[in-house]
Image: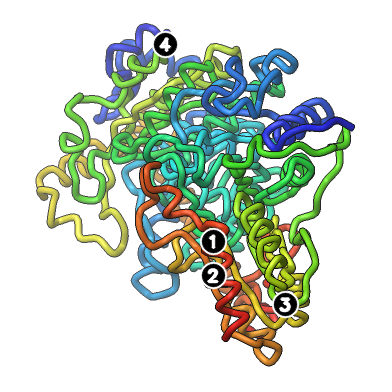
Amino acid sequence: MLKSMDKMDFKVVLPEGRLTDEGRCVWKELSREKKLDFYRWMVQVRQFDRRSILLQRQGRIGTYAPMAGQEAAQVGSALALSKEDWIFPSYREVGVNMVAGIPLKQILLHWMGRVEGNRFPEGSRVLPPYVPIATQLPQAMGAAWAAKMKKEPSVAVAYFGDGATSEGDFHEALNFAGVFRLPVIFFCQNNQYAISTPFRRQSAVPTVAERAAAYHIPGIRVDGNDVVAVHIAMEQAVSRGKQGEGATLIEAVTYRHGAHTTADDATRYREAEEVEEWVRNRDPIHRLEVLLKAEGLLTDADIRDWEEASRQVVEHAVKEAESVPAPAADHLFAHVYEKMPLDLIKQKRDV
Amino acid sequence: MSEITLVQGVCAGLDTALREDPRVVVLGEDVGKNGGVFRATEGLWEKFGEERVIDTPLAESGIVGAAIGMAVNGLLPVAEIQFMGFIYPAFEQIISHAARLRQRTQGQHPASLVIRAPYGGGIRAPELHSDSTESLFVHTPGLKVVVPSTPYDAKGLLLAAIRDPDPVIFLEPMKIYRSMRQEVPDGWYEVSFGQARKVCTGEDVTLISWGAMVPVAEQAARAASDEGVSCEVIDLRSLYPLDMEAVIDSVKKTGRAVIIHEAPKTAGLGAELASRIHEEAFLWMESPVERVTGYDVPVPMFALEDAFRPSVERVGAAVQKVMNF
């Protein structure tokens, strides 16, 4: 199947909520629970994202990187992973992190400027958000290398955007992964803009996926707003990795509905018609909603109930995060070294 | 026990670590089949195989990034950067990630790794091979930085670095890779970080240095002693954490200090040492601290490297200056 996906855009659910011919086979293999899981997670993630933007506007969290529009790419891919798999995310991956079991409270603490938000539940294999672009790719590759050496059945996933594909670390990581056949997945959410810079300015090659050929690894291009297509592509990449077949590059073509961050004004560089097209006609949640309703798996009442439940989950997390006591000033010194050097002990006394 | 050189001390340390700890892997450019361009990994590839002594693509950021990922996933990687002058593509991985992962994850995913790099000049190397930018790493919280100047310390510091839970920059003075031999124990032993080595004791001036400048300081001390000046020579060994106790104790005794390093003067580690001596031993001082360093110019091509690197004569002049203040 992978081979057949190499050269084309892989689609299951079309924007209007209809299954493709190829998609019909995939869809009927999925359990009812799985289909609803896709939907519920995407709604939950969107509720969190909306609330986070408001929290930023109210001064309750710092600058936030909205991800609405990219729910399918994040939820569909993360649901294909298990807890032994490593995740090296960028800063726009709250959806991935939520699916991977990171408590919303921790995610909020991070955006509240609290380093404690970066510590995840015991045994978690999710790293904190990588801010310098593409730096997580070589590290995911290294984690995958260690897994291979230890003969662990796990993959490592680096999540990044289209801008990251211009960085040297993208090339270095994919090159190593190809040479050593490492169980790493490079998951690119091509939302078509790196802040203001359109993808055609990042790359003369029209797609990210075709770059994989240069590293002798498969490159898959999927409709990133089609949660099922993303999920299937990711499942196959995971399976390849775990069977010793090496790395995969996935390009999920998507669009961020909002700005780069709450400090950005996207109207300066994106046409209103373009945004309108993606928000109204290509939304990842809407198409699944239409399909699930048509299949009799979802009613308007279910939708209202789930949205309300999601809102409550988020509200609870906001309360939890905001009730964490402020850190003491000398928390600055915590965990800089395993054992605090003498000079730091002295400096800590001065705080 | 066997009598070996500094570079063989490095190799012996790697050999011991690879043999005794299955988590240890060595990776870098030409470290495998070729045994390293300086032979610091000679024989390891044959002994431990290409999965643990890994010839990588030529990509410093990829090497260090991979090592960080390996460390996060439970290995103890020792990455080689072929020359310190080529470490800069990996700078972001070191500064933004290796140094900070422990703190950023609040202890959950520390990066316990070693990055080895030959450094400094004096071997007529081609252009841009001879940098001595240890201060950049000493200035980065979360890193430890060590520099051996003897075969014994090369092996012992390296084994300590591999077992150290924090990321360690391990700098190897290539000028003295083969300039002396020393008896070095077989098997695992460690030289603790943060402990300077007193090379010789003296009463009048403390000479503080590390790496390839230690033999220069020693020669200057011998020359000074011919003129009746008694020098104490300290080899810092560990640039972070610093053994300020050893430095301050010595300076309080002698009342004079000369710091010798190859790196350019401005904001070099000598500036920090001079400041700390000022803060902690001001009332004991007979003269201001002197620094003998590289000049604030790009490390030159080798035709002028002897003019750039501190010489025995320049150290001698500084000793005279602090004696005659």
At mark 1, the secondary structure is helix
Q: What numbered label is drawn on residue B317?
A: 2
Q: Residues within 10 Å of mark 1 (few under 14, many from 20)?
A: few
Given the current orientation, which residue lies at the most extreme bottom position? B283
Q: How crowded is mark 3: few (under 14 residues within 10 Å), some or many (20 or more)?
A: many
Q: Mark 2 lies on which chain?
A: B
Q: What residue type is labelled 1?
A: Glu
Q: How crowded is mark 4: few (under 14 residues within 10 Å), some or many (20 or more)?
A: some
At mark 3, the secondary structure is loop
Disc 4 to disc 1, C-alpha distance: 70 Å
Disc 2 to disc 1, C-alpha distance: 6 Å
Residue hosting label 3 = B204
Residue A248: quadrant of the picture: top left
Q: Quadrant of the N terminus of chain B?
A: top right
Q: Where is residue B168 in the image (x, y as percent from the top left)?
A: 65, 49
At mark 2, the secondary structure is helix
Q: Which is nearer the eye, A300 or B294?
A: B294
Residue hosting label 4 = A2
At mark 4, the secondary structure is helix
Disc 3 to disc 1, C-alpha distance: 18 Å
